[in-house]
Amino acid sequence: MLITGHTGFKGTWLSHILANAGAEICGISLDPQTDPSLFRLCGIERDLRSEILDIRDFDGVMGIFKDFKPEIVFHLAAQPIVRTSYEEPRMTFEVNVMGTVNILEAARKTDSVRSVLNVTTDKVYLNEDEDLAFTEDMPLDGYDPYSNSKSCSELVTHSYIKSFFNEKEVAVSTARAGNVIGGGDFSRDRIIPDCARAALSGTELVIRNPGSTRPFQHVLEPLFAYMMIVERQFEDTKKAGYYNVGPKLTDCVSAGELSELFVRAWGDEVKIVIRPDGGPHEAGFLKLDCSKIKRTFGWEPVWDIKRAVKETVNWFKVYGSGQDILKEMVSEEEAYMKEKKYE
């Protein structure tokens, strides 16, 4: 199977799970975009074929598809940061829209491909900050360049499905996941990495928008959903579709509440400082209605928000003390698989 974005936070966790299961994996991605990076820390590169390539390079992408001949494609590669999208909107659209076009076009031209998943985001929806949970049939119209580019990525996928993949009987889905947390995320402008940096360094934890509500979930939640989708649609193309993947509605919390949960789980004194910085617009309220994926696959979220934070804190404490992070990742993955009730 082929994974784009395999050097990123979610891509590394996904690669680790699949490699441990014995899968033959090829990854396409840029070099890790953070230092430190989970990809380098856990040494996943030795367990797969790693191609460092910009997905905007269609000839390069096509060459890898032709050579590797994947049956399953996970498309995770993206420019994923809202603030970066305001700073570099053109690059964001190029990566998130034309990068998706290139992956889908390469998949269309590769006869071995049978199952494709494009991972987008909960931010694809037209969001007027109302107290409602988005369903998959609601309008797509992200506000900022990141969110809008992922809306466009969805529409590109819809067009390729109707124009090409239905005729080839190739199953293609999109997954609109909520905000993920977990060990090994070192990104900028994200609440949990900020919490971990403050806790590890003994500095203040600065929160910009404490009232912003998001469908936070542990990274293993969407990853196991992604694997379920590609497997089930591989077996039955009628299972392909557009799916929200998020926590229970009762587990959607604000950034302020999430940071407080982190500090309590960490156990040491971490001072939280509210300091709005007048940054660009970001949605204040996001929730996902996941009835469709539950109805179609019998999927259910496994860990509530307190457990998600606890596992995240455990990972960063292992990392901060110089212990074995791979052992911690395996422990979390095994616990999750044991506790999940869907197949």
Image (cartoon, rainbow, N blue to C red):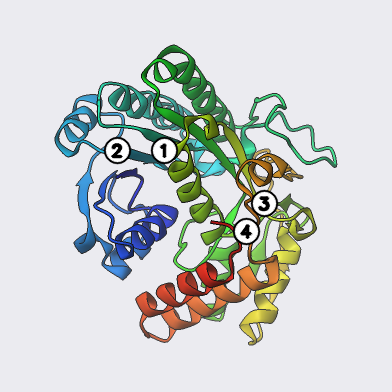
Of the residues under marks 1 and 3, which one precedes in the sequence? 1
Helix, strand or loop at label 2? It is: loop
Give the residue type that dot 4 points to: Gln
Callout in the foreground (4, 1) = 1
Badges 2 and 4: C-beta atoms under 8 Å apart?
no
The residue where tag 3 is placed is 277
237 shown above or below 266: above
Alpha carbon separation for disc pair 2 and 1: 9 Å
In x, y percent, where is residue 208? Answer: 68, 56
260 shown above or below 112: below
Badges 4 and 1: C-beta atoms under 8 Å apart?
no
Callout in the foreground (2, 1) = 1
Is the N terminus in the top left, top right, bottom left or bottom right quadrant?
top left
Alpha carbon separation for disc pair 1 and 3: 46 Å
Q: Which mark is residue 71?
A: 2
Which residue appears farthest toward the right when viewing the image? 131
The residue where tag 4 is placed is 217
Alpha carbon separation for disc pair 3 and 2: 46 Å
Alpha carbon separation for disc pair 4 and 1: 26 Å
The quarter holding residue 107 reads top left
Which residue is at the front of the view, 159 or 124? 159
Of the residues under marks 2 and 4, which one precedes in the sequence? 2
The residue where tag 1 is placed is 234
The quarter holding residue 39 reads bottom left
Give the residue type that dot 1 points to: Phe
Of the residues under marks 2 and 1, which one precedes in the sequence? 2
Helix, strand or loop at label 4? It is: strand
